Image: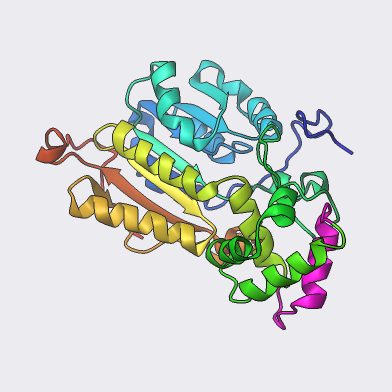
Amino acid sequence: MTSLEGPNPSRIGAPVHIPVLPSEVLEHLAGDASLRASLTGWVVDGTVGAAGHAEALLRECPGLCVLGLDQDPEILAHARVRLAPFGERVRLRHARASQIDALLESEALPAPIGMLLDLGVSSLQLDSPERGFAFQVDGPLDMRMDPTAARTAADIINHWDEADLADLIYHEGGDTRARRIARVIVEARHRHPFLRTGALADLIARGVPSGGKTHPATKLFQALRRAVNEEGEELIAALTAAETRLADSARLVVISFHSGEDGVVKRFISRGARAGRWRALTKKPVSATRSEIRTNRRSRSALLRAAVRVRSPRDGGAAERGPQDQEVSS
């Protein structure tokens, strides 16, 4: 079993992740292909993962540099290998998206001209049973993206009270069976604490069957992962950093895989547009084509929203419109 204390050298450099919506990210973050060679500046990839999007940006836009963050040291090791050919155009840091603001300060970088947030869990994490993100193969009930973090999914399952568990499952997982699931978990953990993903998934499948095509524990595992990694709080902090740190006419692109997250991004952009701080580039979320879904099933639930940072008089002056600030159809 691979230790969670650091990256697994045997997997570094292996093709572990196919980025979702790659052409759409380029289109909305870097603009029309004819303008990409003229773009210069820094782009923040707040969830760099295995660096598929970052690699495409660096390859297509030779004047761009990327500051990439990820809280998972094993995934960050993959990113270092993948982006090594780009040399000093890349800075990779082991950090959370909520640390973007502080990191931009400490790195002494100019205001970025773009920010990308690719939310959710990566293929490498899902395909590593020892990380505990999935239940198809048994593993420890962990789910920490940063293995140095204190709280695991087992801590939540075994110690949260029934009401808090139900609220978590309903609000973060969107499961209408939340109260029943929480009750079954609390009753069972009195006999034996839950330490493995398989035991928890089996309990839900037997005790609270859904009758649908997806496994009855799917939404529970989503809720646990989001709570363990504080994904809701991380998103809000990253969006706030985008509003305070991005340059005039900079672009923000967010890919979400959860309707609640997409709603947060939609409301953030809408409120900013009404206040004169943002201009939406996507009237509705952009989703993957059938062709992409056939080759990358992870893309089937991806939702992309994009916006341009503008400065109203209340923000300290009107924005200068750069070549990258052109409306993109969606």
Q: Position of residue 298 (x, y in %)?
A: 63, 58
Foreground: 245 or 296?
A: 245
Q: Position of residue 148 (x, y in %)?
A: 69, 31
| Residue at 65%, 47% in the rendered image | 122
- Of all residues shown, which one is farthest toward the bottom? 211
Question: Would residue 230 be found to the left or right of residue 124 on screen?
Answer: left
Q: Is 76 above or below relative to 191?
A: above
Question: Would residue 154 be found to the left or right of residue 297 on screen?
Answer: right
The answer to whether any part of residue 328 appears in the image is: no
Q: Which residues are magenta?
A: 193-214
Would you say residue 50 sits in the magenta stretch?
no
Q: Is 26 above or below relative to 285?
A: above
Classify residue 250 by image quadrant: top left
| Residue at 74%, 65% in the rendered image | 186
| Residue at 32%, 49% in the rendered image | 307
Q: Quadrant location of the C terminus?
A: bottom left
